[in-house]
Amino acid sequence: MSANTLSLAEASALIAARKLSPVELLSDCLARIAAVEPKLNAFIRQLPAEAMAQAKQAEAEIATHGPRSPLHGIPVGLKDIIDLAGHPTTCHSKHRLDHVAAADAVVTARLRAQGAVFPGKLSTHEFAIGGPCFDLPFPPARNPWNPAHHPGGSSSGSGASVGGRMLPAALGTDTGGSIRHPASHCGIVGMKPTYGLVSRRGVFPLAFTLDHVGPMTRTVRDNAMMLNAIAGHDPGDPGSVAHATEDYTRALNGGLQGLRIGFVRHFHEADSMASPQVVAALEAAARLLAAEGATVSDITLPSLEQFAAVNRIILCSEAGAIHEHWLREAPGDYAHLTRRRLLPGMFISGPDYVQAQRRRRALVAAVEAAFAEVDLLLCASSMEEACEIDDPAAVDRTYSRQARTPFNVTGHPAVALMCGQHNGLPLALQLVGRNFAEATVYRAAAAYERAAPWAAMAPAL
Amino acid sequence: MMHNAEILARAAGLDRAWRDHQADVEEAIAAVAKLRAGFPRPRDAAAEPMPAYQVPSK
């Protein structure tokens, strides 16, 4: 078995037992990258020599002192809006080709301190907002389950590299669903943590009050291990919360007994009609969660339309403030799709922005009220499987036909994981928890993962 | 006489975008009009937006 197919937890255990070296693990990952990257375009910049030096150093340190953390010697990919010292952070854009990061982002530094290895910078939608574009300096990432299809975005390279078994883990960012969208379409696990739990410093912003950084992995346990490494207060990030450090793996074997789950059916049955296959997959997941011991009941939240409008007004306004200069002076340097997504921010009035932030408070209160009745929410992620990447109308629809933006608006932790398959492509659900209840979200996700058959499936690239 | 969309574009400082990408600008203006209608306004005129401003603690 090639080491690139191991989960992060499996590789970590073998490294700790001296049965696998970080050099062997990285070598197998690099061989996989060489084999499948031409089909997937997951990387903007590969760093094999630098990563090999890191892996050799890790190998020597582990031989002498043992691993300094469960991530010692583990390759981790970085979405290319996250700074890696000494390398460009291009944001997949012509505007940023010459920008070289002077220092690591806080999340990069935390992973580096734990001994992680960095084999490359990963594709994204331009500035984490565009879409799969063919008029940029780098091609768009493609879906590992079928390269003719969209991998989701904006953390598209993160999804493709982990789903494609090139890397065991990657970091993504999520402002309107950009971790959970590619996690859903690439058949992996993507966590948008509670707003403020993970530092955003050194990550190019899209929208300050909606941006989150989070892990993308092949298993729930791997995801919790990654969150252990990157979570923590950062006084240099104004949105960071001084929350006590936790072990997010602690409840993974806790099962579902005693958990109350509210099923937000109206998101996919009334607000945005899901495909019959997604509906069936969600119903089967709800039955499985109940069979495993959870109490599952219907719950009602405000409509998806409201969450989406509030998210978009806030996102476009804040992004407009960041991109104002370029939109005025060099609008032609964006991809067409990115320009279309950014321009609305220049026409949203001050009162519109404040009204959206006022409505946001009411939406947060509504979701908080739901959590007085249940411990977790179950809902759709995407309303259908991944569309073809070269169908612009279908790609456009994928960004509105989803139920991810509510939890960017409210800040609650939300994980997406596979719950079915259609036409050979993954389908996904979301589990959402109270603020800072990531351990409970992982507990339920792990129980579902154990009971369902999806985690054992892999794309046949 | 200037088109309404052109007036808005020039007021937003988007002269170049209007010149080179007029359809994108028109689409953006239409999109914002639709978004504005996407959620109700608070009945309470004094409702606070989120996040509330707080002075730095130090």
Image (tube, coloured by chain):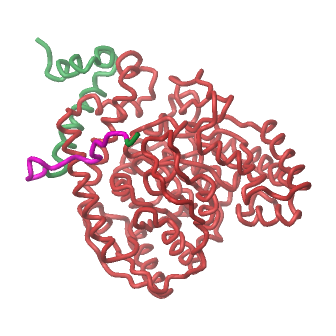
Tell me if residue A29 is in the magenta stretch: no
Q: Main secondary structure of the magenta part?
A: loop
Which percent across, then down, holds residue A77?
66, 46
Left-right relation of A327 to A114:
left
User: Is the residue A212 above or below the residue A328 in the image?
Assistant: below
Tell me if residue B51 is in the magenta stretch: yes
Left-right relation of A58 to A287:
right
Left-right relation of A206 to A355:
right
What's the residue at 58%, 35% (across, down)? Answer: A139
Chain assigned green: B
**Rendered-image quadrant of the C terminus of chain B:** top left
Query: Along the line of sight, which residue is nearer the eye, A413 or A334?
Result: A413
What's the residue at 73%, 60% (across, down)? Answer: A70
| The residue positioned farthest toward the front in the image shown | B58
Q: Is residue A376 visible?
A: yes
Left-right relation of A432 to B45:
right
Which percent across, then down, holds residue A423?
52, 63
Query: Along the line of sight, which residue is nearer the eye, A402 or A103?
Result: A103
Which percent across, then down, holds residue A422?
50, 66
Which percent across, then down, holds residue A248?
58, 66
What's the residue at 44%, 68% (across, down)? Answer: A431
Image: magenta residue range: B42-56
Q: Is residue A386 visible?
A: no
Q: Colour of chain A?
A: red
**Rendered-image quadrant of the N terminus of chain B:** top left
| Quarter-of-image position of residue A169 | bottom right
Query: Along the line of sight, which residue is nearer the eye, B56 or A149?
Result: B56
